[in-house]
């Protein structure tokens, strides 16, 4: 099979021929239909963030595909089934897993980090973790459900506890932030979206944001949010992984407000402890998604509550994965999908 292999920082990805993997006990082999290119991948390639598995390693953790084979005696979706591959898999038997918080499992493994991922024709996945996809969900577009959408769902519904009538400010309108906009709006919240890019703010309005703020503003982004919501947001979700955005999010919420850290940053950020104490603010982290919630995001996509197509800006064959990373570096589009086995590419919006 063909695979895009990571050999270390600054070396890009190398397209190589590898032996087609054979599923071991409990595993399924999935023929990859699409895999999203995420900033996490860029952190490994460009920024020196180490992978758990020492390279060489196949990257890619946001995938969908079709079950190609099951190991003998393995129970799971049968060959030919369309499936979503979760971005991480957990052990299923530790305390965190028993409490339904498998996203905090100490033994969890992330595709393209702890184990080979989906920038390849095939990927091996524990069969019990595969999420069946209904026929009326586009198989390629469904790839982004595995990370961008699922992580946003967890941040909005579980960590943010967003509900009807809440004033929610979402900082960053990439694939994750725009997913958060849709999920918060579907939860009955009043949503304001913040980004540097007017085109992304336009998409945010199309997907449910009632207000948009182009950062930075002359008055200050936080001040603009406080003005929009007449005192501040109830909940702010930082989806950009940018230290300045976190500081603005903390300044944008009203007393008693909640800030959810969804975007990843390797930089330390000073938090105004006095403001947090005096205003009784909450600061919460948000990691991935609980396994049971993947079914919910699939249903939201099937019912049309979640629109996936506006988030997919390009579809490129695996041979052009270098171009996909360049698009990410330039903040071009929203989410690029790599299509293993495809001979052509298709630009989106």
Image (tube, helix red, strand yellow):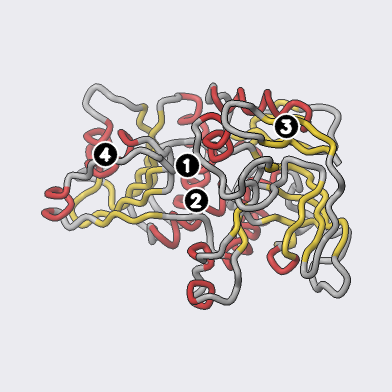
Name the residue rendered at 56%, 54% in the picture. Answer: 150
- Mark 4 vs mark 1, CA separation in Å: 17 Å
| Left or right: residue 286 compared with residue 226 | right
Sequence-first disc among 4 and 2: 2
| Left or right: residue 323 compared with residue 3 | left
Sequence-first disc among 2 and 1: 2
Contact flag, marks 4 and 2 (Cβ < 8 Å): no
Whether residue 205 is visible, yes or no, is no
Contact flag, marks 2 and 3 (Cβ < 8 Å): no
Name the residue rendered at 73%, 51% in the picture. Answer: 137
Identify the residue position indicated by label 2 in the image. Answer: 152
Contact flag, marks 2 and 1 (Cβ < 8 Å): yes
Where residue 229 sits: x, y (%)? Answer: 26, 43
- Mark 4 vs mark 2, CA separation in Å: 20 Å
* Helix, strand or loop for disc 3: strand
Where residue 120 sits: x, y (%)? Answer: 77, 42
- Mark 2 vs mark 1, CA separation in Å: 7 Å
How would you rate the neighbour count of disc 4 (Cα within 10 Å): few for under 14, some for 14-19, many for 20 or more?
A: some
Residue 5's tag is none
Q: Nearer the viewer, residue 323 or 91?
A: 91
Q: How many marks?
A: 4
Quick one: which residue is furthest to the front in this view?
54
Camera-nearest label, 4 or 2:
4
How would you rate the neighbour count of disc 2 (Cα within 10 Å): few for under 14, some for 14-19, many for 20 or more?
A: many
Sequence-first disc among 1 and 3: 1
Residue 315's tag is 3
Name the residue rendered at 63%, 37% in the picture. Answer: 37
Where residue 181 sits: x, y (%)? Answer: 47, 45
Identify the residue position indicated by label 1 in the image. Answer: 177
């Amino acid at each position: 099979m063909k695979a895009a292999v990571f050999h270390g920082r600054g070396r890009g990805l190398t397209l190589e021929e590898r032996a087609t993997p054979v599923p071991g006990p409990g595993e399924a082999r999935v023929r990859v239909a699409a895999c999203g290119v995420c900033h996490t991948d860029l952190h490994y390639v460009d920024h020196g963030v180490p992978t758990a598995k020492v390279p060489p390693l196949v990257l890619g953790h946001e995938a969908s595909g079709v079950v190609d084979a099951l190991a003998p005696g393995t129970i799971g979706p049968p060959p030919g089934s369309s499936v979503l591959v979760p971005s991480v898999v957990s052990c299923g038997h530790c305390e965190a897993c028993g409490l339904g918080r498998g996203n905090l499992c100490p033994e969890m493994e992330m595709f393209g980090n702890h184990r080979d991922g989906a920038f390849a024709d095939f990927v091996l996945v524990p069969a019990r973790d595969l999420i069946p996809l209904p026929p009326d969900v586009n198989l390629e577009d469904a790839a982004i459900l595995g990370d961008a959408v699922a992580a946003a769902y967890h941040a909005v519904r579980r960590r943010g506890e967003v509900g009807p009538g809440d004033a929610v400010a979402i900082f960053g309108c990439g694939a994750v932030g725009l997913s958060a906009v849709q999920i918060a709006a579907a939860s009955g919240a009043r949503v304001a979206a913040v980004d540097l890019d007017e085109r992304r703010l336009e998409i945010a309005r199309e997907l449910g944001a009632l207000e948009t703020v182009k950062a930075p503003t002359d008055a200050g982004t936080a001040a603009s949010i406080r003005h929009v919501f007449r005192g501040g947001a109830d909940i702010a979700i930082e989806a950009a992984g940018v230290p300045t955005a976190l500081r603005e999010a903390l300044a944008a919420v009203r007393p008693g407000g909640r800030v959810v850290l969804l975007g990843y940053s390797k930089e330390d950020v000073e938090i105004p402890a006095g403001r947090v104490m005096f205003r009784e603010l909450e600061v919460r982290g948000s990691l991935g998604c609980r396994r049971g919630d993947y079914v919910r995001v699939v249903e939201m996509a099937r019912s049309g509550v979640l629109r996936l197509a506006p988030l997919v800006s390009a579809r490129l064959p695996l041979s052009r994965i270098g171009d996909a990373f360049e698009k990410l570096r330039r903040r071009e589009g929203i989410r690029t999908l790599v299509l293993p086995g495809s001979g052509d590419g298709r630009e989106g919006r």
